Image: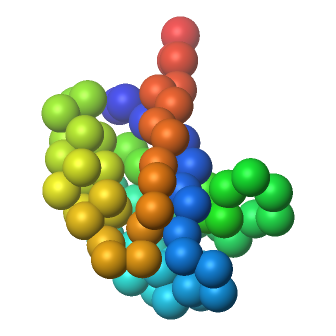
Amino acid sequence: MPKALILITVDSGTDTEVVQEIKNMINVKEIYEVYGAYDIIVMVQGDSDAKIKETVFNKIRQLERVKSTLTMMIIED
């Protein structure tokens, strides 16, 4: 089953609010607030690459406080 890590940058001070909005989305398996260049890391898993793309583009990136995302598909043997 395809998985991806999504690195997210949000408006300053809105990390916790955005985590609450994302954590109950379908396909979201893990979510962490982090320090550094990104504010949040999310692991998503879907039945296909298209389902992951749908979660990123149609849900996460549509949130008002999300400034940018970087998606890294996980390579599985």
- Classify residue 49 as left or right of residue 5: left
Q: Position of residue 23 (x, y in %)?
A: 44, 75
Residue drawn at (74%, 52%) of the image = 37
* Percent x, y of residue 3: 44, 36
> Who's the residue at 38% across and 45% down the image?
45
User: Does 67 sit above or below residue 52?
Assistant: below
From the top left corner, tell me how far across and down residue 19 is, in percent.
52, 78
Residue that extends furthest to the right in the rendered view of this protein: 35
Q: How many marks?
A: 0
Picture quadrant where residue 36 is located:
bottom right
Residue 17 position (above or below residue 47): below
Depth order, front residue of 8/27: 8
- Colour pattern: rainbow
Q: Report if residue 24 is visible in the image.
A: no
Q: Is residue 50 left or right of residue 33?
A: left
Residue at 25%, 39% in the rendered image: 53
Asked if residue 41 is positioned above or below residue 17 in the image, the reply reads above
Is the N terminus in the top left, top right, bottom left or bottom right quadrant?
Answer: top left
Q: Is residue 31 visible?
A: yes
Q: Nearer the viewer, residue 51 or 64?
A: 64
**Residue ID at (25%, 65%):** 62
